[in-house]
Each structure stands twice: as C-alpha cells, then as structure tokens.
Image (cartoon, rainbow, N blue to C red):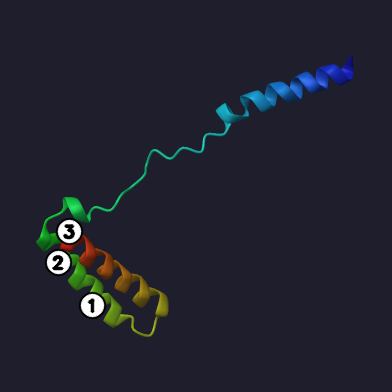
Amino acid sequence: MRNFKLKFLYGYFLALLPFLCNAANNNITSPEAPRRTFIQNYKDMVLGNCLAKAYLNGEIASMDSGSSVSGLEEWDIL
C-alpha cells in the first residue's frame, strides 16, 4: 500500500511539473533598428565606430561594438 501511495504521489507531481516550471519569457526583445529612423541608426553606427576605436586594445569591447555596427548597417540596407 505504501508503494502505491508513493507511485501515486510521484505521478501527481510529474503531472503538475509543467505547470510549476514555466520557461516562457514574455519579455522577448527583438531588434529595434527596423522601427527606428535612419538618422537614429546612423548615430548608433557612429557611436559604435567610436567605441571600437577607443577600445582597440580591449578585444571584447571592440568586437562587440563592431558587430553592433555591422548589424545596424545590414538593417539599414533593408
């Protein structure tokens, strides 16, 4: 009888597990470049180029700002 109760309890918790663990993210952000004007994107490209040149010795900052500029350039073409 005790074994049956444990199996029932495990099954109950396994059935409720999807409701307890919600992995949905309602704060999904998408790129804002298509909704912004060209001049706003251009200012961000200039800022990204300045940051890439300022942090030339810092690989991560330079690479991150350079890739951001590349992404903005691609969005502005569309």
Position of 8 with respect to 28 (left or right) is: right
Q: Which of marks 2 and 3 is nearer the N terminus?
A: 2
Residue 45 in the image: above or below residue 57: above
Q: Quadrant of the C terminus?
A: bottom left
Q: Is mark 1 on a helix, strand or loop?
A: helix
Q: Earlier in the sequence, mark 1 or mark 3?
A: 1
Position of 2 with respect to 72 (left or right) is: right
Residue 76 in the image: above or below residue 7: below
Residue 35 coordinates in the image, percent (x, y): 17, 50
Mark carried by residue 34: none
Q: Is mark 3 on a helix, strand or loop?
A: loop
Residue 13 in the image: above or below residue 34: above
Q: Which residue is label 1 attached to?
A: 50
**As rendered, which of 15 and 53 lies closer to the eye?**
15
In percent of the image, x 81 and y 22: which residue is there? 6
Q: Which residue is label 2 attached to?
A: 42
Position of 71 with respect to 8 (left or right) is: left
Task: Tell us which disc is closer to us: 2 or 1.
Answer: 2
Estimate how packed mark 3 is, as few (under 14), some (14 to 19) or many (20 or more) residues with alpha carbons within 10 Å: few
Mark 1 to mark 3 CA distance (whole Å): 24 Å
Q: Which residue is label 3 attached to?
A: 78
Instruction: Check whether the beta carbons of the residues at disc 2 and disc 1 lie within 8 A of each other.
Output: no
Query: In the image, what residue type sits under mark 1?
Result: Cys
